[in-house]
Amino acid sequence: MDNATGATYGADDAGLICGFACRPGAAAKEIGSAEAAQWLARPEKEGFLWLHFNLGHNASERWLRNTARLPEPFFETLKEGLHSTRIERDEDALVAVINDVHFDFSFEPSDISTLWISVQPGLVVTARLRPLRSVDKLRASMKAGEQLRSSAELLERLMRSQADVLVEIVRGVTARIDGIEDDLLAGKLHHKRVKLGALRRLLVRLQRLLAPEPAALFRLLQYPPGWMAAMDVQELRQSTEEFSVVLRDMASLQERIKLLQEEIAAQVNEDNSKSLFVLTIVTVLALPINIIAGLFGMNVGGIPLSQHAHGFWVVVGVIALITGIAARFAFRAGRRDGDD
């Protein structure tokens, strides 16, 4: 499992996490950095290599420059800090930047990292800083003996694995939204707006990072390198279409989350309006007694009914009458607003 977290854990002295030598008609053979260096030094090569590096290892970039001799645009993409997905062609090589989720993905926008890829006829190099799910799935299938005919097919499998991971994310987000929607219909809010906001930020970031990918691939497939077979071009086109479907599903989920947020906001506003109405009613009903109590409590001469035997009850009756009239008008206005 690609679960290295330190600079050297899970990688050899060159920073290589895993390496596979692939030959036509044979299962992939796992190799180390020393065997990979010997294979790259051969004048005649059969098949291709897949080397997966941990960029957190201090020796990885040096090994890739001196031994693998990757094209310079690959190292430029490592340093430029732009993480939007794209695939560029440098003569006969392909340099790709794709984004994937961490192996310990927990539906947080920060759990998304970048994978850098260099594809040549006889060599595929992938490099990352954090463990990623799509690479781990491809690595597991290679260890199980899967056969790949070309480096372009490995790129296609990597893209397809990434699409499968995104499908799982979409399904997980859909299940969470279904639960929130059920709670909403049952009248149980419990701060669901916060959860919906987090899910929406996750989808927005995924879509922003992945949206350029289909367009970039379509441009590449119009003018593929000469070493890329027609079958490889067709499979890459199919994987691109799968990405487009996933991105459309993400857009639909964002719209669904937006509608749920609006519904929750409407319910919150309605509850606030009810609370404000109750507070207004209480204020209105308490207004007559407060006014009259204030007037009779001034302790000045000439206060009416001060010498009357039943003055207290007269004042209480007047207050009750005024309060009843105010309550009738207030509740009638409330019912009229509710009917509207």
Image (spheres, rainbow, N blue to C red):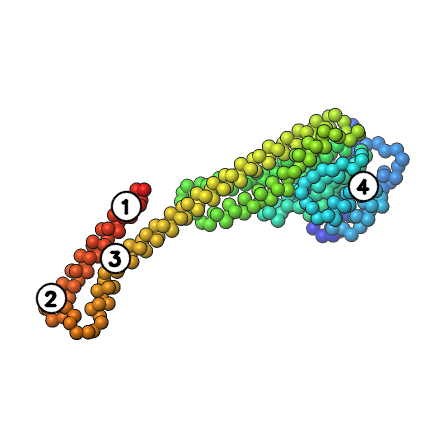
The residue labelled by disc 1 is 335
Q: For the residue marked with disc 4, what is the amino acid?
A: Pro
Disc 4, SS: loop
**Residue in front for this viewpoint, 313 or 219:** 219
* Residue beneath disc 3: 285
Q: In front: 242, or 140?
A: 242
The amino acid type found where label 2 is placed reads His
Tell me, yes or no, whether the two marked residues, 3 and 4, touch with CB atoms within 8 Å. no
Residue type at mark 1: give it.
Arg
Point 50% across, 41% down: residue: 257
Query: How far across and how far down the image is residue 317, in percent?
Result: 16, 60
Which mark sits nearer the N-terminus, 2 or 3?
3
Q: Earlier in the sequence, mark 2 or mark 4?
A: 4
Rendering quarter of residue 326: bottom left
Pointer 2: residues within 10 angstroms few (<14), some, or many (20+)? few
For the residues marked 2 and 3, what is the alpha-carbon distance in whole angstroms? 24 Å
Q: Are marks 1 and 3 in contact (CB under 8 Å)?
A: no
Question: What residue is rendered at 58% in x and 43% in y?
Answer: 204
Identify which residue is drawn at 58% across, 47% down: 108
